[in-house]
Amino acid sequence: MFFEDWKTRIETYFENARHNLQRKQQILARLKQVHQQVREVIDSGSTSATGIPWELAHGLTILDGVAAGKPLPTTVAELPTRVMDDGTLLGCRKWELLDPKWGEALVEWMEHLADRASWGQTPGSVAMPPEHVSLAIAGDWGTGDGIAGKVAKAMGQRPADYTVHLGDVYYAGANPDEGRDLSAWPAGTLGQFTLNSNHEMYSGAVGYFRELAQRFPLQNGTSYFSLQNDHWLIVGLDTAYYADEMNLYMDGALGDQQTAWLKQLAQGCSKRILLLSHHQGYSIDGTSKTALYDQVLNALGREPDYWYWGHLHNVICYQPQGKLRGRCVGHGAIPYGRASILDNQARVAWTETQSAGDDQYPDRILNGFVRLTLDGETLREEWIDENGNKRWPLP
């Protein structure tokens, strides 16, 4: 396996960071905690989503720090796949929660805790067509494998003016993964955009910013941007760069400079506002709002009309809450199952439940993307699956 190489890299990191004993102790304590949490979930048979940072799960095993008889499973034979209540797949196959290759994310994260790309300061500002605009949006798409290819092909069947990736190239946004995966991203006829994310940040967003310069020129080398016409202000946010690195960038944050930019952008704006981000504004079931939601509203001075995010590997269309229609578009490529936590949830208008008929992942439901059509002040959504079929809203 890859564990021996990763062990060497981690030991090298600890040696180079020996002046920061507190950081080393903090990381080791976190690895022990996560290992114990995962062990308890496996042994109990629980399907409850627990907020565990699964990228850290194999860390103790990599460092040979597991007590005898208590290593975590690394093969399908050791752990049959279990669908958790949030739809994630607890198993050892590729992209499942205990896929051993998530260890790469752990190692990259440690190596880049104090080594990240510079923050961009020249956000792109794009003038959209005046009346009719189409966008295709997918999140968490950067796997580079068959499902991502199917979604890209479906997006290309009706090319949109602009395409937007809501972030996450796996396992850790590192080269050559970032370049290889994003080279297959379907371009819009007028341009394409990609957002920063927790997985890009694991490698310090170095690969991400390199790809901005090569494939996403409308962003001016910056991880946040805006598009406007007479009716709409569309804002793409970087919610990962200033997120808490010791929490693996899992909870979104704006940072002071981006907050000031967003305030200036929204000042005196009477247009409809559509937000794009990697991190979410709601809890998965829509019953509570995140700290990022509060930051965004404070900067905008009002609720946006629509907000599309990824991060959670689901597709969820929430009922309107106040003025806002929140949308999770995190089903671009990672295999996921039916999220039972959303069953009969009053705040959810629609979520995917249809089997993908995938022999490799029998529990997988359909992946896909959303296509938006802006016609004046009107927005029309089409939620489309990996096969190019419209899933919602249905006639």
Image (cartoon, grey):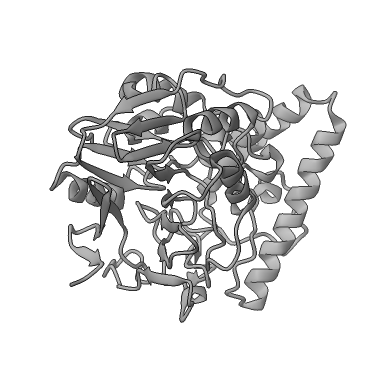
Q: Tell me if residue 50 comes above or below residue 156 in the rendering.
A: below
Seen from the viewer's position, the closer of residues 108 and 329 is 329
Seen from the viewer's position, the closer of residues 271 and 1 is 271
Residue 342, percent across and down? 48, 74
Residue 216 visible in the displayed image: no
Residue 233 visible in the displayed image: yes
Q: Specify the farthest residue to the bottom.
A: 344
**Residue at 86 percent of width and 35 percent of height:** 22
| 283 on left or right of 278 | right
Question: Residue 234, located in which quarter of the rendered image?
Answer: top left
Residue 302, percent across and down? 53, 47
Residue 178, percent across and down? 41, 32
Q: Specify the farthest residue to the left.
A: 157
**Residue at 48 percent of width and 44 percent of height:** 278
Seen from the viewer's position, the closer of residues 165 and 40 is 165
**Image quarter of the C terminus:** bottom left
| 80 on left or right of 384 | right
Seen from the viewer's position, the closer of residues 144 and 245 is 245
**Residue at 68 percent of width and 45 percent of height:** 247
Residue 144, percent across and down? 33, 42
Q: Tell me if residue 394 comes above or below residue 21 in the rendering.
A: below
Question: Residue 168, located in which quarter of the rendered image?
Answer: top left
Q: How many labels, in total? A: 0
